[in-house]
Amino acid sequence: TQSPIETRLLSPDSEHIAYAAMMLAKGRLVGMPTETVYGLAADARNPQAVAGIYAAKGRPSFNPLIVHAPDLEAAQRIGRFSPDAERLAQAFWPGALTLVVPLQDGAGIARLVTAGLDTIAIRVPAHPVAQDLLHAFGGMVAAPSANPSGRISPTRPAHVMAGLGGRLSVVLDAGACPVGVESTIIGWQQGRPVLLRPGGIPAEALAEALGQPIATAPPVTDTAQPLAPGMLASHYAPRAPLRLNAIEAQGDEILIGFGQVRGEFSLSERGDLVQAAANLFDALHRADATGRPIAIAPIPDHGLGQAINNRLERAAAPR
Ligand code: TXA
Ligand code: MG
C-alpha cells in the first residue's frame, strides 16, 4: 500500500488537458473519460507508469491492458492488422471496439501492458476529451477501467474519486459516459473472429460488417491461461448480493427496474437497451451505496442487452 497522493478533479478545458498530458509524460496516472467508462490512463511506453496502474487497481498481474491510440495509423505502429481487423477498425473506430491483434515488432510498449502475450488489445476512443488528451500527450496510453479491481466500473467522475481517489493525479471531469459499458473485444483464433467480451458495440453489427458470424469465446475457467483475462467469473461486483431476473423485490432488496418492471429506479422505463447500458453501472453504484441486497429486472439478451447481461451475471457470480 502506498501513501495517498493529491487527486485533482479538473474540468477538461485545454489548460487542464495540457496539465493532464504533462502528468502522463511524467509517468503519473490520469482518470480519462471515454465514451464507454472512465479509464485509468498511463503512458503505455513507461513500464513504471504501467506498473502504477496495476498497483492502484490492485489488479492481478496476469491481466493485460487495452492501449488507447488516437487513430488507426497510430494503432498500426503497435499492432499488426489483418484485412478483417482493418475492416472492423475502419467501420467502428473511433468507438467502443477493442481489437486484439499480433504485437508489432519494435512497438515500444511496456511488457506489462500485454502481460507478456504476443498480442495487444487496442482501441481508438471516440470521446472528444480522450481524443484531446491523446493528441496533447502525443503518445498512447494503457487504460483499464478506473475502478479497484473486481469492483463496479466507473461511468462518472464521482465513481472514480470514490474508488481510486488518492491513487491517481488527475481526473478529467466530462460528466457521465454516454455508452456506459466497456468496449466490445474481438480477437482472432485460427484466423476466425472471436467475441472475447460483449460490450458497447453489439456483436450483430460487427458480424454484419465482417460478413461472417463471430464465435463467442468459451467461458474462462483456467485462470492461469485466460483468453481475455478480464472475463474471470466474479467481476464488477457490488458489495451486496445481486439477484437477477427479478420481477419484484423480496425482503429488504432494492429493485432496479427495466421496462415493465418498475423498481425503486429503472435502467430504462421505456425498455431501451442503449439507455439501460448508459445507466447500468451508475445504478449498481447507487444501489450498492444503500447497503441493501440488490435485485434487478430481466434484460433482453440482444443488442446491448448482451453486454449488460454479461456484466450482471458476473456481478452476481459467487465470490
Ligand atoms: O471500454 C473499455 O474497453 C475500457 C475503457 C477505459 O477503454 N477499458 C477496459 O479495460 O475495459 P479493462 O482493462 O477493464 O479490460 C481489458 C480487457 C480485459 O478483459 C483483458 O483481459 C483484455 O481486455 N485484454 C487485454 N489485452 C488482451 C490480449 N492481448 N488478449 C486478450 N485479451 C486481452
Ligand atoms: Mg474493468
Image (cartoon, rainbow, N blue to C red):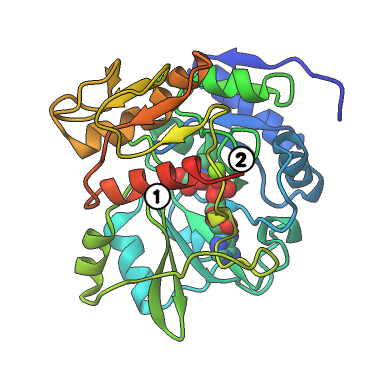
Residue drawn at the location 86% of the way across and 21% of the way down: 3
Res. 49 image quadrant: top right
Q: Which residue is mark 1?
A: 310
Left or right: 42 with respect to 15?
right
Asked which secondary structure carries label 1, the reply is helix
The reply to whether residue 145 is in sight is: yes
Which quarter of the frame holds ligand 2?
A: top right
Q: Looking at the picture, how far across and down is residue 222, in whole percent? A: 64, 68
Where does the C terminus fall, quadrant-wise?
top right
Amino acid type at mark 1: Asn
Query: Which three-letter amino acid code belongs to the residue tagged 2?
Result: Gly
Q: Residues within 10 Å of mark 1 (few under 14, many from 20)?
A: some
Q: Nearer the viewer, residue 227 or 129?
A: 227
Query: Does 303 sit above or below residue 268?
Result: below
The residue at which mark 2 appears reads as 150
Q: Which circle's residue, 1 or 2, is located before the other in the chain?
A: 2
Q: Percent position (x, y) of residue 206?
A: 27, 63
- Determine whether 190 is above or below 184 in the image: below
Label 1 to label 2: alpha-carbon separation: 14 Å
Answer whether labels 1 and 2 touch (C-beta < 8 Å).
no
Which quarter of the figure is the N terminus placed in? top right
Considering every residue shown, the one lying at the far bottom of the view is 190
**Rendered image quadrant of residue 169:** top right
Q: Is residue 302 left or right of residue 221?
A: left
Q: Residue at x 53, y 22 (%)?
A: 159
The residue lying at 73 percent from left, 43 percent from top is: 54
